[in-house]
Amino acid sequence: MNIYRKCIELLESGMNVVQITVVKSSRGTPGKPGFKLLLTDNNETYGTVGGGALEHRAIEEAGKVLKSGENQIFEYNLKELGMKCGGRTTLVLEYLKGVKSFMLFGGGHIGQALTPILVSLGFHVTVFDSRKEVREKIVEGPQKSVVIGDYNDLSPVKERIKASEFAFIATHGHEHDYTVLKQILEIPGDFRYIGLIGSRKKVKTTLERLEKDSLAVPEYLFAPVGINIGGDTAAEIVVSIAAEVVACIHDVPANHLRDRVDSVINNPSTITP
């Protein structure tokens, strides 16, 4: 296993990682300079710093670094750790923050305008659409990927959905929107934000369907989507959505359209997703 490639893979999947590196060791110690071990925020480990009590202690300290986000340096006397080989080993623990993952369902006008803004906010954006021509509209890059598939089957992006905390739904049909939303809510995940485009009437119908399908309406569902900025053009809707995402990232109060009884913005009858 190439530890560097594995680290990049984990970070790009949205995982936070602590990279533990042996930077100095005395003769006879099991961990040699350059040995590395990765600990993810779901407690998976890859690689080694020599095993035994040293590695056990390193993983314990790495767990603390995952919580604090602060890098650390430790020097260990292996004999004091109960390791017969003795000697001393110095470890550097580096906190590496995973790329935030954003699932965007629908690569129409709204999706095309929203994608570059989300990329500028530090997200890796995966655009899922059933129309092949979307690939011509949204050019893939280091922080953008396009998946063409069937809205009735999100299994090709299931792992990406599970790794994401943010999603936005604006397909080219009400039924597609509901099909996507239902599947997302049925996939175990740790979402902070799911935005759903639509008028208040559409949202009311959607909530009723969720209840009928025995699905709870989560607090992180924002529908109608966006913050009230007083506009209803495609560009203005995109700005309001991006602002809402930023508010959720920082967990600050905002004038969400979902909280307004008279909200009529982002009506898909006037805007083509």
Image (cartoon, rainbow, N blue to C red):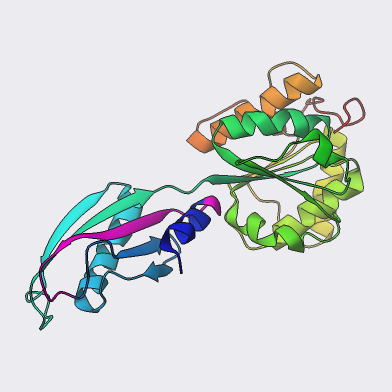
User: How many numbered marks, from 0 up?
Assistant: 0
269 up-or-down from 231: above or below: below
Does residue 160 appear left or right of residue 210 in this picture?
left
Where residue 171 sits in the image (x, y, percent)?
Answer: 84, 42
Hey, which residue is sitting farthest top in the picture?
230
Where residue 139 sits in the image (x, y, percent)?
Answer: 74, 36
Does residue 113 appear left or right of residue 50 in this picture?
right
Whether residue 251 is visible: no
Whether residue 87 is visible: yes
The picture quadrant where one finds residue 214 is bottom right
Quadrant containing the C terminus is: top right
The answer to which of 208 and 224 lies nearer the viewer is 224
141 part of magenta stretch:
no
Does residue 156 appear left or right of residue 41 in this picture?
right
Hey, which residue is sitting farthest bottom in the picture?
84
The answer to which of 102 and 182 lies nearer the viewer is 102
Does residue 122 appear left or right of residue 187 in this picture?
left
30 up-or-down from 226: above or below: below
Q: Residue at x 87, y 45 (%)?
A: 205
Magenta segment, which residues?
A: 12-29
The picture quadrant where one finds residue 239 is top right
Where residue 224 sits in the image (x, y, percent)?
Answer: 76, 34
16 part of magenta stretch:
yes
The answer to which of 154 and 233 lies nearer the viewer is 154
Q: Residue at x 75, y 63 (%)?
A: 155
Q: Residue at x 22, y 63 (%)?
A: 33
194 up-or-down from 258: above or below: below
Where residue 225 sits in the image (x, y, percent)?
Answer: 72, 34
